[in-house]
Amino acid sequence: MQAMFRLSYCVLAILLLSACAGSPVRVSAPPVAQPDMDNAMRKRGYKPALYRGERVYCRNETITGSNLQTKVCLTARQIEDLERSGKDMLTGPHPDGCGPETRGCM
């Protein structure tokens, strides 16, 4: 009988130690509403939403070469990066014969 109690205590101790040794649970504060950013994104056609605890902005976009639409959700940083890369593509250096002032690349 005493051996059974010792075994039970050992099992209990191992379970407690393994529970404490695991990675800590992260508890994050609820996202704070960003009215300025939300208004700026609404003007661009996005609607604010939460996805996995992160603020994202969604809109329906038409798939190229199709009449179908798909819902695209991105963070504000991703949207700004995409817009910046698009502007860089238009205003950046181009090989001879390519550019916004010409009608095509040779």
Image: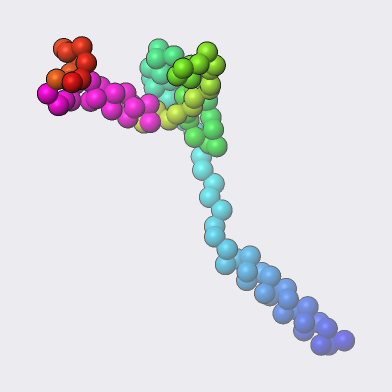
User: Residue at image x 52%, y 13%?
Assistant: 67
Magenta residues span 78-96
Where, by quadrant of the figure, is residue 23 drawn?
bottom right
Q: How many marks?
A: 0
Magenta segment's dominant SS is helix
Q: Position of residue 82 (x, y in %)?
A: 34, 27
Q: Position of residue 5 (x, y in %)?
A: 81, 82
Query: Please, which residue is most extreme toward the front here?
Result: 106
User: Residue at image x 29%, y 23%?
Assistant: 86
Q: Quadrant of the N terminus?
A: bottom right
Q: Position of residue 33 (x, y in %)?
A: 47, 26
User: Residue at image x 53%, y 22%?
Assistant: 71
Q: Nearer the viewer, residue 94 or 31?
A: 94
Q: Is residue 58 magenta?
A: no
Q: How is the image coloured?
A: rainbow
Q: Is residue 49 left or right of residue 14?
A: left
Compared to residue 5, the image places residue 76 above or below, namely above
Compared to residue 60, the image places residue 54 above or below, namely below
User: Residue at image x 20%, y 11%?
Assistant: 103
Compared to residue 32, the image places residue 65 above or below, namely above
